[in-house]
Amino acid sequence: MNGWAATFAEAAAVGVAEGCEADNEFFLRSGRNNSSQSQETGTTDDNNVNRVSELARSYLLASRSSNNGKKRPRRECSPMNDDEVSSMKKQDTCDHSNDDDDVSVEGVLHENEIVLLDRKNRRVLSSSERTNDGGYVEIGKLDEDGGVKLFDQGANKDVEFPYPTSSDDHCETPLEAYSDIKVILKKIAKKLCTENKKKSKHLAIYDPYFCNGSMVGKLNSLGFRNVYNKMEDCYAIWEKNTTPEFDVLVTNPPYSGDHIEKLMRYVTGDALGERPWLLLMPEWVHKKDYFLQCIGKKCRPLYLVPKKRYVYLPPPGFREKTSSDTHKKSSPFTSYWYIWGGSQDRTDLLAEYFSEKSDGKCMSARSKNGLRDLRRMNKNN
């Protein structure tokens, strides 16, 4: 550690910025006095610190006395010319509702874990996890009394679902998977909603398959605040036509049984109309007869294939321990996003927009042959 004397001596040699002339005497005195004192008497850093503290105190008192307790007037900034103003304007009008640059947070200990509180927006944020663009991950809310209420984590395997389930289907979609479609969802909110253009936080997202509800918090953290995902029998609801109002369907369905086939028949049927859907499914689905029958020969979905394979973790206590870490943590096959914009034109628009705005973490394809080429490319790399 450098001595305080040397540090302040160097600081004293720096020129004084315009408008700071009143501070000059303090810095000169601190540098001069501490430098000479350390050289002549060999005083320690602690003594130098004490000397600087005394100088700071005397300077502050003198400054208050000379100004009669009034605050120093604010420094005026010279106005920008038209060229400077124009250079600051951006052409992209994307909604930045997830920007956390100006968010004020405080850390607190909750159930032996540090969490961050955004009291202004009544959010509870993760202290260790961030989105791909550096934003906070929302993990709970503050109640009316300011108490921490974390999102439901689906306590354990003994939870009773109102429909048949398989333990292998209980896996959480990772945050990076939702981050990869963020640009698509924003485009849907801005351009594809049939009513007025919507901000991301107003886009109504429907996920019919419930695992433990954590997907709500993950999408919230990306700026999408209107998300519906509840523990209910979606097939019974579809049959009764009592689904909630929504703009887009986003889901990672159970892979067991005939869940994927039922989902495909629903999203390509009359019930969804021209609403978009984004489905996170295994790579083999696009080869299945039911998939080809549902989308038809003329439909060309958009496929987003992550360069890094998604890892799925079961909620705590939802699975028995196994000797295979792969079985415990992930599916034994690659998965990627199957995307339909509601019509072929809209899907083409999403594909074009993604190619322009992609952060490079996913590759896109538009056909069976395109997916084959991506697999070959990955093998060669």
Image: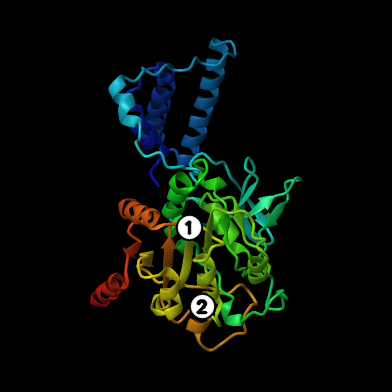
Q: Residue furthest bottom?
A: 323
Q: Is residue 368 visible?
A: yes
Among the two numbered marks 2 and 1 on one chain, the one whose residue lies closer to the N terminus: 1
Residue denoted by label 2: 329
Nearer to the camera, 139 or 358: 358
Residue 163 pos. (x, y %): 69, 76
Question: Could you tell whether 168 is left or right of 187 in the image?
Answer: right
Q: Is residue 137 visible?
A: no
Question: Could you tell whether 268 is left or right of 344 in the image?
Answer: right
Residue 287 pos. (x, y %): 38, 79
As displayed, is residue 340 above or below residue 156? above
**Mark toward the viewer: 2 or 1:** 1
Question: Could you tell whether 155 is left or right of 7 in the image?
Answer: right
Residue 373 pos. (x, y %): 26, 73
Alpha-carbon distance for marks 2 and 1?
Answer: 30 Å
As displayed, is residue 13 above or below residue 273? above
Res 358 → quadrant: bottom left
Q: Which mark is residue 276?
A: 1
Q: Which mark is residue 147?
A: none
Q: Residue at x 52, y 75 (%)?
A: 260
